[in-house]
Amino acid sequence: MINFNVPPFTGKEMDYMKETIENQKICGDGPFTKKCSEWIEQQTKTAKCLLTTSCTHATELAALLTDIKEGDEVILPSYTFVSTADAFVLRGARAVFVDIRPDTMNIDETLIEDAITERTKVIAPVHYAGVGCEMDVIMEIADRHHLMVVEDAAQGIMASYKGKALGTFGDFGCFSFHETKNFSMGEGGALLIRDEKYIEEAEIIREKGTDRSKYYRGQVDKYRWQNYGSSYLPSDMNAAYLYAQLELAEEITQARIDRWNQYRELLAPLEKEGKIELPYIPDYCSHNGHMFYIKTKDMEERSRLIEYLKKKEILSVFHYVPLHSAPAGLKFGRFHGEDKYTTKESERILRLPLFYKLTADQVEYIANQVRAFYQ
């Protein structure tokens, strides 16, 4: 059976985790947490990276830093994971969903401005499949309307828009290190902070509302409760697992891109025949091989293809059910404008297996089975 996903593993993870145990430092903000954060800061050229227990928590932390309050509105795509909305509705905000572009599956930047009201406070673009949203346009709109931007770059590490790392355009960016992502610590994430003025507040909220980070740096003689907060620190054992992969980030990313390119080459004839659609990458975007998907004619065809591939011992999956059609989406949000593409395109997407150790032979077998289905 070819699994849809196999969590990345390089071989050094166990050694590094053992090291944390032997050093008797397994809680948050240990040596490996610092190594991971510094690596991400250098890679993305952002002011500060704070490792978190999940991308969900990174987004919640970002929502707190934007000072979201009850009655505020956040503009985002409906085609995203629930955490993008949850982080804001937990604080009483209203999710305002707008349609996506059918080519990249990202938020349609041309529809954002019309959704802005006097209650709008944040725009939350989602870089689907590690392909950048139109950040130049989004940032121009945000600046003109004095709005904050929180980038959901859960799938975006090692990807860029016009040469700049995803997650570094907005006020805050959020990465995921879930087991399905390019680099993993099981569960985990990171908050990227663009402006240094937010670093101290972010550290306090992340450390249960205390100035414990300052205490460990020797800046205060004791730490005290300063503000509201929670515990967003991952164990240093988790960070040790992640750091083993960050050391091989270029190799892991290239391996995924190689398999992505192979899929595209092998399935291009089906697209040319008009039987499927393949992912689109704008010229000015550099993706990270996070996901390879095809678009079928409709949901019924997709279901038949999933079952066909399963019989051939290939696990493939569909992706998000649009949030605006879910019970919580109806309760906590509204769709602005016409749902021209969100639902229609979401019902066509089929994700094929893609992970670090996926082999060229396996990709060839999978592509052959997809072709056989359409014959």
Image (cartoon, helix red, strand yellow):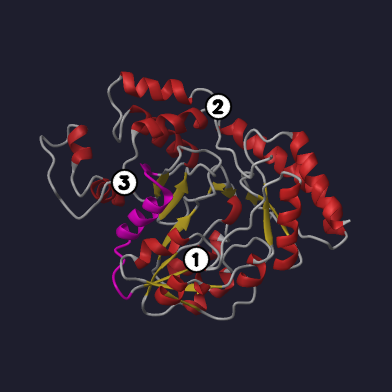
Which mark is drawn over residue 316? none
- Magenta part of the protein: which range? 47-71
Q: Position of residue 57 (x, y in %)?
A: 36, 51
SS class of the residue under badge 2? loop
Near mark 3 (Cα within 10 A), the count class, few <14, some 14-19 or many ≥20, is: many
- Which residue lies under the disc numbered 2? 10
Quarter of the image for residue 37 reads top left
SS class of the residue under badge 3? loop
Left or right: where does residue 142 sit relative to residue 103? left
Name the residue type under label 3.
Tyr
Return the residue nearer the eye: 2 or 198: 2
- Which residue lies under the disc numbered 3? 232
- Which residue lies under the disc numbered 1? 140
* Vertical arrangement, residue 335 with respect to residue 146, above or below: below
3 or 1: mark nearer the eye: 3
Name the residue located 55 percent from the left edge and 68 percent from the top edge: 322
Left or right: where does residue 295 sit relative to residue 130? right
Report the quarter where the C terminus lies.
bottom right
